[in-house]
Protein backbone atom coordinates (compact mmCIF):
# COMPACT_ATOMS: atom_id res chain seq x y z
CA UNK A 1 0.00 0.00 0.00
CA UNK A 2 2.91 2.41 0.89
CA UNK A 3 4.52 1.59 -2.53
CA UNK A 4 1.26 2.33 -4.38
CA UNK A 5 0.86 5.64 -2.55
CA UNK A 6 4.43 6.61 -3.48
CA UNK A 7 3.85 5.82 -7.19
CA UNK A 8 0.59 7.79 -7.26
CA UNK A 9 2.37 10.73 -5.60
CA UNK A 10 5.08 10.72 -8.28
CA UNK A 11 2.46 10.53 -11.09
CA UNK A 12 0.52 13.48 -9.70
CA UNK A 13 3.70 15.53 -9.38
CA UNK A 14 4.91 14.63 -12.84
CA UNK A 15 6.76 17.88 -13.22
CA UNK A 16 8.95 16.99 -10.21
CA UNK A 17 11.49 14.24 -9.76
CA UNK A 18 10.56 11.86 -6.90
CA UNK A 19 13.45 11.06 -4.57
CA UNK A 20 13.90 8.36 -1.98
CA UNK A 21 16.30 7.99 0.92
CA UNK A 22 20.04 7.76 0.52
CA UNK A 23 22.29 5.75 2.87
CA UNK A 24 23.16 7.58 6.12
CA UNK A 25 26.88 8.25 5.78
CA UNK A 26 28.35 8.35 9.32
CA UNK A 27 32.18 8.07 9.34
CA UNK A 28 35.26 8.42 7.19
CA UNK A 29 38.28 7.22 9.17
CA UNK A 30 41.84 7.45 7.86
CA UNK A 31 43.80 4.20 8.43
CA UNK A 32 47.59 4.05 8.23
CA UNK A 33 48.40 0.42 9.04
CA UNK A 34 49.42 -1.53 5.89
CA UNK A 35 49.27 1.55 3.65
CA UNK A 36 46.98 4.56 3.68
CA UNK A 37 43.27 3.80 3.33
CA UNK A 38 39.91 5.27 4.36
CA UNK A 39 37.26 3.23 6.12
CA UNK A 40 33.78 4.38 5.07
CA UNK A 41 30.79 3.57 7.29
CA UNK A 42 27.07 4.12 6.77
CA UNK A 43 23.63 3.03 7.95
CA UNK A 44 20.69 1.49 6.10
CA UNK A 45 18.12 4.29 5.41
CA UNK A 46 15.18 1.86 5.86
CA UNK A 47 13.54 2.93 2.61
CA UNK A 48 10.36 0.90 1.84
CA UNK A 49 9.25 2.24 -1.55
CA UNK A 50 10.52 -0.87 -3.36
CA UNK A 51 13.06 -3.67 -3.38
CA UNK A 52 16.68 -2.74 -2.67
CA UNK A 53 19.05 -2.88 -5.63
CA UNK A 54 22.32 -1.14 -4.69
CA UNK A 55 24.29 1.54 -2.81
CA UNK A 56 26.84 3.65 -4.69
CA UNK A 57 29.84 5.45 -3.19
CA UNK A 58 31.32 8.49 -4.98
CA UNK A 59 34.67 10.11 -4.16
CA UNK A 60 36.72 13.19 -5.04
CA UNK A 61 39.89 14.92 -3.88
CA UNK A 62 38.20 18.31 -3.99
CA UNK A 63 35.16 19.32 -1.99
CA UNK A 64 33.49 20.70 -5.12
CA UNK A 65 34.36 17.68 -7.29
CA UNK A 66 34.41 16.28 -9.81
CA UNK A 67 33.12 13.12 -8.03
CA UNK A 68 33.50 9.69 -9.63
CA UNK A 69 31.89 6.38 -8.78
CA UNK A 70 34.17 4.55 -6.37
CA UNK A 71 32.23 1.33 -5.85
CA UNK A 72 28.81 -0.29 -5.85
CA UNK A 73 27.42 -2.22 -2.88
CA UNK A 74 24.87 -4.89 -3.76
CA UNK A 75 24.09 -6.22 -0.26
CA UNK A 76 21.87 -4.08 1.91
CA UNK A 77 23.42 -5.62 5.04
CA UNK A 78 26.87 -4.28 4.13
CA UNK A 79 27.66 -1.10 6.09
CA UNK A 80 31.42 -0.54 5.57
CA UNK A 81 33.86 -0.20 2.72
CA UNK A 82 37.65 0.23 2.77
CA UNK A 83 39.00 2.64 0.16
CA UNK A 84 42.58 1.49 -0.43
CA UNK A 85 45.42 2.90 -2.52
CA UNK A 86 44.80 6.49 -1.59
CA UNK A 87 47.44 9.21 -1.57
CA UNK A 88 48.05 10.04 2.12
CA UNK A 89 48.82 13.68 1.24
CA UNK A 90 45.38 14.25 -0.30
CA UNK A 91 42.04 14.93 1.34
CA UNK A 92 39.21 12.72 0.13
CA UNK A 93 35.50 13.55 0.04
CA UNK A 94 32.65 11.04 -0.20
CA UNK A 95 28.89 10.86 -0.62
CA UNK A 96 26.46 7.97 -1.27
CA UNK A 97 23.28 7.25 -3.19
CA UNK A 98 20.87 4.33 -3.25
CA UNK A 99 18.78 2.55 -5.85
CA UNK A 100 15.41 0.87 -5.21
CA UNK A 101 12.90 -0.76 -7.56
CA UNK A 102 10.57 2.21 -7.46
CA UNK A 103 9.97 5.42 -9.38
CA UNK A 104 12.19 8.42 -8.83
CA UNK A 105 15.82 8.68 -7.89
CA UNK A 106 18.03 8.69 -4.78
CA UNK A 107 18.73 11.64 -2.54
CA UNK A 108 22.39 12.45 -1.94
CA UNK A 109 23.85 11.71 1.47
CA UNK A 110 25.89 14.26 3.41
CA UNK A 111 29.37 14.78 2.01
CA UNK A 112 32.03 13.70 4.51
CA UNK A 113 35.78 13.92 4.30
CA UNK A 114 38.69 12.06 5.87
CA UNK A 115 39.96 15.19 7.59
CA UNK A 116 40.70 14.98 11.33
CA UNK A 117 37.93 15.79 13.75
CA UNK A 118 38.04 19.56 14.47
CA UNK A 119 38.33 21.35 17.78
CA UNK A 120 35.46 23.85 18.01
CA UNK A 121 36.45 27.45 18.82
CA UNK A 122 36.13 27.68 22.63
CA UNK A 123 34.75 31.17 23.25
CA UNK A 124 34.94 31.32 27.05
CA UNK A 125 34.52 29.48 30.32
CA UNK A 126 32.22 31.41 32.64
CA UNK A 127 31.11 30.75 36.20
CA UNK A 128 27.35 30.49 36.41
CA UNK A 129 25.52 29.47 39.61
CA UNK A 130 28.90 28.47 41.08
CA UNK A 131 29.74 25.98 38.30
CA UNK A 132 32.05 26.40 35.26
CA UNK A 133 30.13 26.75 31.99
CA UNK A 134 31.91 26.10 28.65
CA UNK A 135 30.68 28.05 25.62
CA UNK A 136 31.95 27.28 22.12
CA UNK A 137 31.08 27.93 18.48
CA UNK A 138 29.65 24.79 16.87
CA UNK A 139 31.29 23.43 13.69
CA UNK A 140 28.15 23.10 11.58
CA UNK A 141 29.84 22.44 8.23
CA UNK A 142 31.58 19.27 9.50
CA UNK A 143 28.83 16.74 8.99
CA UNK A 144 30.57 13.80 10.62
CA UNK A 145 30.55 15.47 14.07
CA UNK A 146 28.29 13.40 16.30
CA UNK A 147 29.18 14.95 19.68
CA UNK A 148 31.50 17.36 21.45
CA UNK A 149 33.78 16.03 24.14
CA UNK A 150 35.74 17.43 27.07
CA UNK A 151 39.28 16.10 27.10
CA UNK A 152 41.67 16.42 30.02
CA UNK A 153 45.39 16.98 29.82
CA UNK A 154 46.01 13.24 29.49
CA UNK A 155 43.80 13.09 26.35
CA UNK A 156 41.16 10.96 28.09
CA UNK A 157 37.49 11.88 27.83
CA UNK A 158 35.89 13.74 30.75
CA UNK A 159 32.35 14.01 29.41
CA UNK A 160 30.34 14.02 26.16
CA UNK A 161 27.76 16.46 24.79
CA UNK A 162 25.78 14.76 22.00
CA UNK A 163 24.69 16.93 19.05
CA UNK A 164 26.61 18.84 16.37
CA UNK A 165 24.66 22.04 17.12
CA UNK A 166 25.32 22.03 20.90
CA UNK A 167 27.16 25.09 22.23
CA UNK A 168 27.43 24.71 26.01
CA UNK A 169 28.54 22.38 28.80
CA UNK A 170 28.24 22.73 32.62
CA UNK A 171 30.96 21.09 34.69
CA UNK A 172 28.92 20.21 37.78
CA UNK A 173 31.84 18.26 39.28
CA UNK A 174 33.60 21.48 40.36
CA UNK A 175 32.30 24.19 42.66
CA UNK A 176 33.94 27.43 41.66
CA UNK A 177 33.97 28.72 45.25
CA UNK A 178 36.56 26.06 46.10
CA UNK A 179 39.35 27.77 44.14
CA UNK A 180 40.85 28.55 40.75
CA UNK A 181 39.45 26.45 37.90
CA UNK A 182 41.58 25.31 34.96
CA UNK A 183 39.45 24.28 31.99
CA UNK A 184 39.62 21.15 29.88
CA UNK A 185 39.98 21.07 26.09
CA UNK A 186 36.83 20.83 23.98
CA UNK A 187 37.03 18.52 20.98
CA UNK A 188 34.63 16.76 18.62
CA UNK A 189 33.79 13.11 18.15
CA UNK A 190 32.38 11.12 15.24
CA UNK A 191 29.82 8.38 15.66
CA UNK A 192 32.66 5.90 15.11
CA UNK A 193 34.69 7.28 18.01
CA UNK A 194 37.14 9.26 15.86
CA UNK A 195 38.60 12.33 17.61
CA UNK A 196 41.05 15.07 16.76
CA UNK A 197 44.78 14.66 17.31
CA UNK A 198 46.01 18.27 17.38
CA UNK A 199 44.68 20.14 20.44
CA UNK A 200 44.41 23.94 20.52
CA UNK A 201 47.26 25.96 21.94
CA UNK A 202 45.43 27.90 24.62
CA UNK A 203 43.70 26.50 27.69
CA UNK A 204 41.06 28.64 29.39
CA UNK A 205 41.01 29.60 33.07
CA UNK A 206 38.17 31.88 34.29
CA UNK A 207 38.64 34.76 36.71
CA UNK A 208 38.82 33.85 40.40
CA UNK A 209 37.61 36.58 42.76
CA UNK A 210 38.77 36.97 46.35
CA UNK A 211 38.25 39.75 48.84
CA UNK A 212 39.83 41.15 51.95
CA UNK A 213 37.26 42.75 54.21
CA UNK A 214 38.80 45.44 56.39
CA UNK A 215 36.83 45.49 59.65
CA UNK A 216 38.42 48.80 60.64
CA UNK A 217 37.33 50.70 57.53
CA UNK A 218 34.06 51.18 55.69
CA UNK A 219 35.06 49.23 52.58
CA UNK A 220 35.91 45.85 51.10
CA UNK A 221 38.96 45.30 48.90
CA UNK A 222 38.50 43.02 45.88
CA UNK A 223 41.20 41.28 43.88
CA UNK A 224 41.02 38.71 41.11
CA UNK A 225 43.11 36.62 38.75
CA UNK A 226 43.50 37.35 35.02
CA UNK A 227 41.28 35.56 32.54
CA UNK A 228 43.47 33.11 30.61
CA UNK A 229 42.85 31.62 27.19
CA UNK A 230 42.14 34.59 24.92
CA UNK A 231 45.28 34.71 22.81
CA UNK A 232 48.96 34.06 23.53
CA UNK A 233 49.24 36.85 26.10
CA UNK A 234 45.86 36.24 27.77
CA UNK A 235 44.52 39.55 26.51
CA UNK A 236 41.39 41.04 28.14
CA UNK A 237 39.52 44.12 26.97
CA UNK A 238 38.14 45.17 30.36
CA UNK A 239 36.84 43.96 33.71
CA UNK A 240 33.48 45.03 35.14
CA UNK A 241 32.54 44.76 38.82
CA UNK A 242 28.94 43.80 39.60
CA UNK A 243 27.29 43.94 43.04
CA UNK A 244 23.94 42.63 44.25
CA UNK A 245 22.91 44.28 47.52
CA UNK A 246 20.35 42.74 49.88
CA UNK A 247 18.98 40.42 47.16
CA UNK A 248 18.12 43.37 44.91
CA UNK A 249 19.04 43.97 41.29
CA UNK A 250 22.63 43.40 40.18
CA UNK A 251 24.39 46.70 39.50
CA UNK A 252 27.57 47.66 37.66
CA UNK A 253 29.69 49.53 40.21
CA UNK A 254 33.02 49.86 38.41
CA UNK A 255 35.08 49.13 35.29
CA UNK A 256 38.83 48.39 35.17
CA UNK A 257 41.10 48.12 32.16
CA UNK A 258 43.03 44.88 31.70
CA UNK A 259 46.02 46.10 33.71
CA UNK A 260 44.11 46.59 36.98
CA UNK A 261 42.63 43.68 38.90
CA UNK A 262 41.77 45.28 42.26
CA UNK A 263 38.83 47.39 43.38
CA UNK A 264 37.67 49.03 46.62
CA UNK A 265 33.93 49.04 47.21
CA UNK A 266 32.37 51.39 49.80
CA UNK A 267 28.75 51.95 48.83
CA UNK A 268 27.11 49.79 51.53
CA UNK A 269 26.00 49.85 55.15
CA UNK A 270 27.26 47.38 57.72
CA UNK A 271 24.85 44.50 57.92
CA UNK A 272 24.07 44.60 54.17
CA UNK A 273 24.23 41.30 52.31
CA UNK A 274 26.58 41.68 49.33
CA UNK A 275 27.10 39.37 46.35
CA UNK A 276 29.99 40.39 44.09
CA UNK A 277 31.35 39.00 40.80
CA UNK A 278 33.65 40.13 37.98
CA UNK A 279 32.89 40.13 34.25
CA UNK A 280 35.82 39.82 31.82
CA UNK A 281 35.48 40.83 28.15
CA UNK A 282 37.16 39.28 25.11
CA UNK A 283 39.86 41.62 23.71
CA UNK A 284 38.21 42.07 20.29
CA UNK A 285 34.64 40.74 20.53
CA UNK A 286 32.57 42.35 23.31
CA UNK A 287 29.83 39.77 22.78
CA UNK A 288 32.17 37.20 24.28
CA UNK A 289 32.57 37.45 28.04
CA UNK A 290 33.15 35.39 31.16
CA UNK A 291 31.95 35.78 34.76
CA UNK A 292 34.05 34.98 37.82
CA UNK A 293 32.87 33.10 40.87
CA UNK A 294 30.37 35.05 42.98
CA UNK A 295 31.18 35.92 46.61
CA UNK A 296 28.24 36.48 48.96
CA UNK A 297 28.63 37.67 52.55
CA UNK A 298 27.17 39.90 55.22
CA UNK A 299 29.27 43.04 55.60
CA UNK A 300 30.52 43.67 59.12
CA UNK A 301 32.69 46.08 61.00
CA UNK A 302 34.62 45.43 64.17
CA UNK A 303 33.05 47.16 67.14
CA UNK A 304 32.79 46.99 70.90
CA UNK A 305 30.48 44.07 71.80
CA UNK A 306 26.99 44.98 72.94
CA UNK A 307 27.23 42.18 75.51
CA UNK A 308 30.40 40.80 77.10
CA UNK A 309 29.74 38.69 80.18
CA UNK A 310 31.54 35.96 82.11
CA UNK A 311 29.06 33.10 82.45
CA UNK A 312 30.69 30.53 84.72
CA UNK A 313 33.92 29.49 86.41
CA UNK A 314 33.50 25.80 87.15
CA UNK A 315 36.16 23.65 88.80
CA UNK A 316 37.17 20.56 86.85
CA UNK A 317 39.35 19.47 89.77
CA UNK A 318 41.09 21.29 92.60
CA UNK A 319 43.48 23.08 90.25
CA UNK A 320 41.69 23.43 86.91
CA UNK A 321 38.89 25.90 86.31
CA UNK A 322 36.86 26.08 83.12
CA UNK A 323 35.84 29.69 82.45
CA UNK A 324 33.03 30.40 79.98
CA UNK A 325 31.86 33.76 78.66
CA UNK A 326 29.62 35.32 76.05
CA UNK A 327 30.68 37.96 73.52
CA UNK A 328 27.99 39.22 71.16
CA UNK A 329 28.60 38.20 67.52
CA UNK A 330 28.53 41.82 66.36
CA UNK A 331 32.12 42.07 67.65
CA UNK A 332 35.12 40.52 65.90
CA UNK A 333 37.67 39.56 68.57
CA UNK A 334 41.40 39.63 68.04
CA UNK A 335 42.08 38.37 71.56
CA UNK A 336 40.59 37.84 75.00
CA UNK A 337 42.31 38.38 78.35
CA UNK A 338 41.06 36.94 81.64
CA UNK A 339 41.64 38.94 84.81
CA UNK A 340 41.73 36.95 88.04
CA UNK A 341 40.21 39.25 90.69
CA UNK A 342 40.05 39.22 94.49
CA UNK A 343 36.27 39.55 94.97
CA UNK A 344 36.70 41.33 98.32
CA UNK A 345 39.27 43.98 97.43
CA UNK A 346 38.56 43.99 93.65
CA UNK A 347 42.33 43.90 93.11
CA UNK A 348 43.82 42.00 90.17
CA UNK A 349 45.62 38.86 91.36
CA UNK A 350 46.95 37.91 87.93
CA UNK A 351 46.22 38.45 84.24
CA UNK A 352 45.89 35.68 81.67
CA UNK A 353 46.80 37.46 78.44
CA UNK A 354 45.59 36.40 74.99
CA UNK A 355 44.17 33.12 76.23
CA UNK A 356 43.97 30.21 73.82
CA UNK A 357 40.18 30.16 73.89
CA UNK A 358 37.75 27.66 72.38
CA UNK A 359 34.82 28.96 70.36
CA UNK A 360 31.90 26.81 71.48
CA UNK A 361 29.23 28.35 69.29
CA UNK A 362 27.94 31.69 68.08
CA UNK A 363 28.96 34.10 70.83
CA UNK A 364 30.12 31.45 73.31
CA UNK A 365 33.76 30.98 74.33
CA UNK A 366 35.67 29.03 76.98
CA UNK A 367 39.16 28.62 78.43
CA UNK A 368 40.65 26.04 80.81
CA UNK A 369 42.74 27.70 83.50
CA UNK A 370 45.10 24.88 84.46
CA UNK A 371 46.45 26.83 87.43
CA UNK A 372 43.18 27.93 88.96
CA UNK A 373 43.02 29.13 92.56
CA UNK A 374 41.80 26.37 94.93
CA UNK A 375 42.57 27.94 98.34
CA UNK A 376 40.19 30.87 98.20
CA UNK A 377 37.38 32.28 96.07
CA UNK A 378 38.33 34.38 93.06
CA UNK A 379 36.47 36.17 90.30
CA UNK A 380 37.14 36.05 86.54
CA UNK A 381 36.60 39.11 84.38
CA UNK A 382 36.80 39.11 80.57
CA UNK A 383 38.73 41.74 78.62
CA UNK A 384 38.19 42.07 74.86
CA UNK A 385 40.33 43.53 72.06
CA UNK A 386 39.48 43.59 68.35
CA UNK A 387 41.50 43.95 65.16
CA UNK A 388 41.11 47.70 65.32
CA UNK A 389 42.49 47.86 68.88
CA UNK A 390 39.09 48.60 70.41
CA UNK A 391 38.99 47.36 74.00
CA UNK A 392 36.30 46.68 76.57
CA UNK A 393 35.72 44.67 79.75
CA UNK A 394 32.72 42.55 80.65
CA UNK A 395 31.01 41.48 83.87
CA UNK A 396 32.79 39.03 86.15
CA UNK A 397 31.80 35.75 87.77
CA UNK A 398 32.83 34.58 91.26
CA UNK A 399 33.89 30.97 91.70
CA UNK A 400 31.64 28.60 93.59
CA UNK A 401 34.05 28.19 96.51
CA UNK A 402 32.89 26.22 99.58
CA UNK A 403 34.33 25.94 103.09
CA UNK A 404 33.99 22.97 105.45
CA UNK A 405 34.34 23.10 109.24
CA UNK A 406 33.75 20.56 111.99
CA UNK A 407 31.21 21.98 114.46
CA UNK A 408 30.65 18.95 116.69
CA UNK A 409 31.97 15.48 117.38
CA UNK A 410 30.02 14.12 114.42
CA UNK A 411 28.86 17.21 112.52
CA UNK A 412 30.33 19.28 109.68
CA UNK A 413 29.19 22.68 108.41
CA UNK A 414 29.47 23.43 104.67
CA UNK A 415 29.18 27.07 103.54
CA UNK A 416 29.08 28.61 100.06
CA UNK A 417 28.78 32.08 98.50
CA UNK A 418 25.50 33.93 98.64
CA UNK A 419 26.18 35.63 95.29
CA UNK A 420 28.13 34.72 92.18
CA UNK A 421 27.62 37.96 90.23
CA UNK A 422 27.32 41.65 91.00
CA UNK A 423 23.97 42.80 92.27
CA UNK A 424 23.45 44.78 89.05
CA UNK A 425 23.37 41.53 87.07
CA UNK A 426 19.98 39.84 87.29
CA UNK A 427 20.19 36.09 87.54
CA UNK A 428 18.21 33.32 89.22
CA UNK A 429 19.65 30.43 91.18
CA UNK A 430 17.63 27.37 90.28
CA UNK A 431 19.13 24.52 92.31
CA UNK A 432 21.90 23.51 94.69
CA UNK A 433 23.25 19.96 94.71
CA UNK A 434 25.62 18.88 97.51
CA UNK A 435 27.85 15.83 97.02
CA UNK A 436 29.75 13.82 99.64
CA UNK A 437 32.70 11.42 99.52
CA UNK A 438 34.57 9.35 102.10
CA UNK A 439 38.34 9.27 101.76
CA UNK A 440 38.20 11.18 98.45
CA UNK A 441 36.44 8.33 96.61
CA UNK A 442 33.32 8.53 94.44
CA UNK A 443 30.90 11.35 95.23
CA UNK A 444 27.24 10.78 96.09
CA UNK A 445 24.55 13.44 96.23
CA UNK A 446 23.37 13.87 99.79
CA UNK A 447 21.18 16.97 99.65
CA UNK A 448 19.53 19.67 97.55
CA UNK A 449 19.55 22.70 99.84
CA UNK A 450 17.01 25.43 99.18
CA UNK A 451 17.98 28.43 97.07
CA UNK A 452 17.78 30.66 100.16
CA UNK A 453 20.39 28.57 102.00
CA UNK A 454 24.10 29.33 102.12
CA UNK A 455 25.08 26.54 104.55
CA UNK A 456 24.33 22.91 105.33
CA UNK A 457 25.02 20.75 108.41
CA UNK A 458 26.01 17.16 107.77
CA UNK A 459 25.95 14.51 110.53
CA UNK A 460 28.64 11.89 109.87
CA UNK A 461 28.19 9.73 112.98
CA UNK A 462 27.26 6.76 110.80
CA UNK A 463 30.77 6.88 109.35
CA UNK A 464 32.62 6.74 112.69
CA UNK A 465 34.44 3.54 111.74
CA UNK A 466 36.05 5.22 108.72
CA UNK A 467 39.30 7.11 108.79
CA UNK A 468 37.40 10.36 109.12
CA UNK A 469 38.48 12.03 105.85
CA UNK A 470 35.35 13.55 104.28
CA UNK A 471 35.05 15.62 101.09
CA UNK A 472 32.28 17.84 99.75
CA UNK A 473 31.51 19.67 96.54
CA UNK A 474 28.57 21.83 95.51
CA UNK A 475 27.01 22.40 92.10
CA UNK A 476 24.82 25.43 91.56
CA UNK A 477 22.51 25.77 88.54
CA UNK A 478 21.31 29.18 87.42
CA UNK A 479 20.29 31.34 84.49
CA UNK A 480 20.42 35.01 83.55
CA UNK A 481 17.11 36.85 83.66
CA UNK A 482 17.44 39.76 81.24
CA UNK A 483 20.59 39.31 79.14
CA UNK A 484 19.44 38.26 75.69
CA UNK A 485 20.24 35.88 74.06
CA UNK A 486 21.75 34.05 77.06
CA UNK A 487 18.72 34.52 79.32
CA UNK A 488 17.38 31.14 78.15
CA UNK A 489 20.64 29.28 78.72
CA UNK A 490 20.93 27.03 81.78
CA UNK A 491 24.37 27.26 83.38
CA UNK A 492 26.11 25.41 86.21
CA UNK A 493 29.21 25.83 88.32
CA UNK A 494 30.96 23.15 90.38
CA UNK A 495 33.00 23.98 93.45
CA UNK A 496 36.37 22.38 94.09
CA UNK A 497 36.29 19.34 96.34
CA UNK A 498 36.87 20.55 99.92
CA UNK A 499 38.04 17.87 102.35
CA UNK A 500 38.27 17.74 106.13
CA UNK A 501 39.92 15.32 108.56
CA UNK A 502 37.59 14.78 111.52
CA UNK A 503 39.03 15.05 115.02
CA UNK A 504 39.53 11.62 116.58
CA UNK A 505 36.96 10.80 119.28
CA UNK A 506 37.91 8.49 122.23
CA UNK A 507 35.28 6.89 124.45
CA UNK A 508 36.27 4.79 127.48
CA UNK A 509 33.87 2.55 129.46
CA UNK A 510 33.68 2.96 133.25
CA UNK A 511 33.23 -0.77 134.00
CA UNK A 512 33.28 -4.21 132.48
CA UNK A 513 32.33 -7.71 133.60
CA UNK A 514 34.30 -10.86 132.90
CA UNK A 515 32.15 -13.23 130.83
CA UNK A 516 29.52 -10.50 130.64
CA UNK A 517 28.05 -8.59 127.76
CA UNK A 518 31.28 -6.59 127.60
CA UNK A 519 33.89 -9.21 128.54
CA UNK A 520 36.90 -6.98 127.84
CA UNK A 521 37.87 -3.45 128.65
CA UNK A 522 38.86 -1.44 125.54
CA UNK A 523 38.32 2.02 124.07
CA UNK A 524 36.06 3.01 121.20
CA UNK A 525 38.02 5.06 118.62
CA UNK A 526 36.00 7.23 116.21
CA UNK A 527 37.67 8.66 113.06
CA UNK A 528 41.04 7.20 113.95
CA UNK A 529 43.75 6.90 111.32
CA UNK A 530 47.10 6.52 113.07
CA UNK A 531 49.62 3.90 114.15
CA UNK A 532 50.43 5.80 117.34
CA UNK A 533 48.37 4.20 120.14
CA UNK A 534 49.07 2.86 123.61
CA UNK A 535 46.87 1.68 126.47
CA UNK A 536 48.20 0.76 129.94
CA UNK A 537 46.24 -0.56 132.95
CA UNK A 538 47.32 -0.13 136.58
CA UNK A 539 45.98 -1.49 139.88
CA UNK A 540 45.13 0.82 142.75
CA UNK A 541 48.74 0.60 144.03
CA UNK A 542 50.14 1.82 140.73
CA UNK A 543 51.53 -1.43 139.41
CA UNK A 544 51.15 -1.87 135.61
CA UNK A 545 49.27 -5.12 134.89
CA UNK A 546 48.46 -4.76 131.13
CA UNK A 547 49.70 -2.92 128.01
CA UNK A 548 48.79 -2.94 124.28
CA UNK A 549 49.50 -0.86 121.13
CA UNK A 550 46.46 -2.21 119.28
CA UNK A 551 43.29 -0.11 119.72
CA UNK A 552 41.26 -3.20 118.83
CA UNK A 553 42.72 -5.27 121.65
CA UNK A 554 41.17 -4.97 125.14
CA UNK A 555 41.93 -6.23 128.67
CA UNK A 556 40.07 -9.40 129.63
CA UNK A 557 40.84 -9.14 133.38
CA UNK A 558 43.95 -11.34 133.35
CA UNK A 559 47.00 -9.86 135.05
CA UNK A 560 50.53 -10.08 133.74
CA UNK A 561 51.20 -13.16 135.95
CA UNK A 562 48.30 -15.05 134.38
CA UNK A 563 45.96 -14.82 137.37
CA UNK A 564 42.53 -13.23 137.22
CA UNK A 565 42.40 -9.79 138.74
CA UNK A 566 40.23 -9.20 141.74
CA UNK A 567 37.03 -7.22 141.63
CA UNK A 568 38.23 -3.69 142.21
CA UNK A 569 38.85 -0.28 140.67
CA UNK A 570 41.66 0.12 138.15
CA UNK A 571 43.37 2.99 136.35
CA UNK A 572 43.89 3.31 132.55
CA UNK A 573 46.29 5.54 130.61
CA UNK A 574 45.58 5.91 126.87
CA UNK A 575 47.83 7.90 124.56
CA UNK A 576 47.43 8.32 120.78
CA UNK A 577 48.09 10.67 117.88
CA UNK A 578 44.86 12.10 116.47
CA UNK A 579 44.00 12.73 112.82
CA UNK A 580 45.18 16.29 113.21
CA UNK A 581 48.60 15.01 114.37
CA UNK A 582 48.14 16.22 117.96
CA UNK A 583 49.26 13.74 120.67
CA UNK A 584 46.55 13.07 123.24
CA UNK A 585 46.78 11.39 126.66
CA UNK A 586 43.75 10.42 128.69
CA UNK A 587 43.57 8.74 132.11
CA UNK A 588 40.68 7.55 134.24
CA UNK A 589 39.33 4.75 136.44
CA UNK A 590 37.02 1.87 135.78
CA UNK A 591 35.62 -1.07 137.79
CA UNK A 592 36.17 -4.78 137.17
CA UNK A 593 33.06 -6.80 138.07
CA UNK A 594 33.07 -10.56 138.46
Image (cartoon, grey):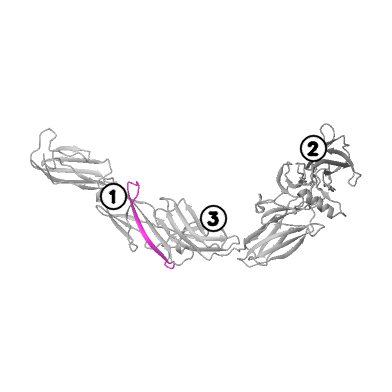
Residue 594 lies left or right of residue 44; in this view the side is left
Tell me, yes or no, if residue 535 can be seen here. yes
Give percent across and percent down for residue 200: 80, 46
Residue 358 lies left or right of residue 257; in this view the side is left
Distance between the alpha carbons at the discs numbered 2 and 3? 89 Å
Q: Relative to 18, say whether 424 is above or below.
A: below
Q: Which residue is mark 1?
A: 502
| Part of the protein shown in magenta | 423-444
Distance between the alpha carbons at the discs numbered 1 and 2? 115 Å
Residue 581 lies left or right of residue 286; in this view the side is left
Q: Which residue is mark 2?
A: 75
In front here: 431 or 229?
229
What SS does tag 1 mark?
Answer: loop
Q: Nearer the viewer, mark 2 or mark 3?
A: 2
At x 73%, y 43%, the residue is 153
Q: Which residue is mark 3?
A: 354
Name the quarter where the C terminus is drawn.
Answer: top left
Check disc 1: other Cα within 10 Å, few if <14, some if 14-19, many if 20+.
Answer: many
* Mark with earlier residue (2, 3): 2
What SS does tag 2 mark?
Answer: loop
Give percent across and percent down for residue 397: 44, 60
Give percent across and percent down for residue 415: 33, 58
In front here: 309 or 260?
260
Check disc 3: other Cα within 10 Å, few if <14, some if 14-19, many if 20+.
Answer: some
Tell me, yes or no, if residue 139 can be seen here. no
The image quadrant that residue 488 belongs to is bottom left
Q: Kindly give the residue lying farthest to the right in the view shown.
A: 66
Amino acid sequence: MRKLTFLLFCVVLSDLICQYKSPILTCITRKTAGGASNEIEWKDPNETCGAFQKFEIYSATNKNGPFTLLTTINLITTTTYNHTGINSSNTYYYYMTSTYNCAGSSNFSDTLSDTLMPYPPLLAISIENNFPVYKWKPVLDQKKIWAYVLINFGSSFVDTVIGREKTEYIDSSFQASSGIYTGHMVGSLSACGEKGLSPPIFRHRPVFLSLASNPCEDEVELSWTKYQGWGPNDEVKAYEIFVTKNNGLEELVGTNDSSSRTFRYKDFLFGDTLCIRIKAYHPTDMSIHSFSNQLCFVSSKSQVPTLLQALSASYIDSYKTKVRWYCSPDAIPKSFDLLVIDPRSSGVIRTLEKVNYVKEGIGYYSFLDSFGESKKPVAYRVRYEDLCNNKSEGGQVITNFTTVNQIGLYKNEIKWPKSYFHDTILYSKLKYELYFSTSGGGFTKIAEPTIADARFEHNVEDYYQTEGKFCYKLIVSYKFDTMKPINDSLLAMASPAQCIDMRTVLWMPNAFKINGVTPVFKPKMYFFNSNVFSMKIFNRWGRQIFETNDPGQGWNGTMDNGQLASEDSYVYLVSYSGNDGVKVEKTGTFTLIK
